[in-house]
Amino acid sequence: MDIHKVLTLLPHRYPFLMIDRVLEIEAHQRILATKNVTYNEPFFNGHFPIRPVMPGVLIVEAMAQATALLAMESNPETVSETSIYLFVGIDKARFKRQVEPGDQLQIEMHQKTLKRGIGFFSGSAVVDGKIAATADIMCTARDFRD
């Protein structure tokens, strides 16, 4: 899935779009997506000027956006012009290494269960084969007119 397809599915835009490409996707199973981290990212101006580090909350946001793409691929009936996937929960978030300009963040998320319209996912963000973050994420589809 290239950036053009990602843009048709996710409502996020610069500077908040955190997925550049989907490398692998298996409906109801897993997704492998990438985020190219560049020095141009606006958050590096203040986090931190001396030694730029990608904020952990944005790593988790990248994981949530990958999760939404997997949920949409797994449940195409929930995708419409008036629907949006919402990040509704996070558990067990852990940060293991810093993510810096020039890194390529690989995000792998696995679908665990779907209960009462809420999807439960687990996964990690990895740089050069080393885990940067892990988390369990929950999301659900909602009609944004409600």
Image (cartoon, rainbow, N blue to C red):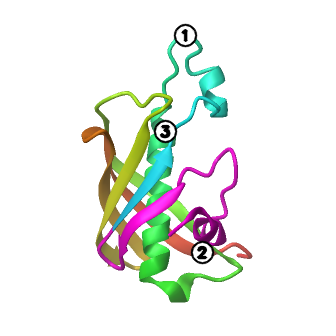
Mark 1 Cα shell of 10 Å, populated few (<14), some (14-19), many (≥20)? few
Marks 2 and 3: which is nearer the front? 3
Q: Amino acid at mark 3?
A: Val
Q: Which comes sooner in the sequence, label 2 or label 3?
A: 3
Q: Amino acid at mark 2?
A: Arg
Question: Quarter-wise, where is residue 33 in the image?
Answer: bottom left
The answer to whether residue 54 shows anywhere in this view is yes
Residue 16 painted magenta: yes
Residue, disc 1: 50
Mark 3 Cα shell of 10 Å, populated few (<14), some (14-19), many (≥20)? few
Residue 29 locus on image (x, y percent):
29, 74
Q: Amino acid at mark 1?
A: Ile
Question: Quarter-wise, where is residue 5 in the image?
Answer: bottom right
Mark 3 residue element? helix
Q: Residue furthest bottom?
A: 77
In three-dimensional space, the C-alpha distance between marks 2 and 3, rounded to whole angstroms, equals: 23 Å
What stretch of residues is rendered in magenta? Answer: 1-30
Q: Which comes sooner in the sequence, label 3 or label 1?
A: 1
In this rendering, would 133 be left or right of 46? left
Mark 2 Cα shell of 10 Å, populated few (<14), some (14-19), many (≥20)? some
Residue 100 locus on image (x, y percent):
46, 28
Residue 124 painted magenta: no
Which residue is drawn at the image coordinates 55% and 17% (left, top)? 48
Which residue is drawn at the image coordinates 37% and 72% (left, top)? 25
Q: Which comes sooner in the sequence, label 1 or label 2?
A: 1
Contact, mark 1 vs mark 2 (Cβ under 8 Å): no
Mark 1 residue element? loop
Residue, disc 2: 142
Q: Is residue 74 above or below residue 95?
A: below
Disc number at residue 57?
3
Which residue is drawn at the image coordinates 44% and 73% (left, top)? 71
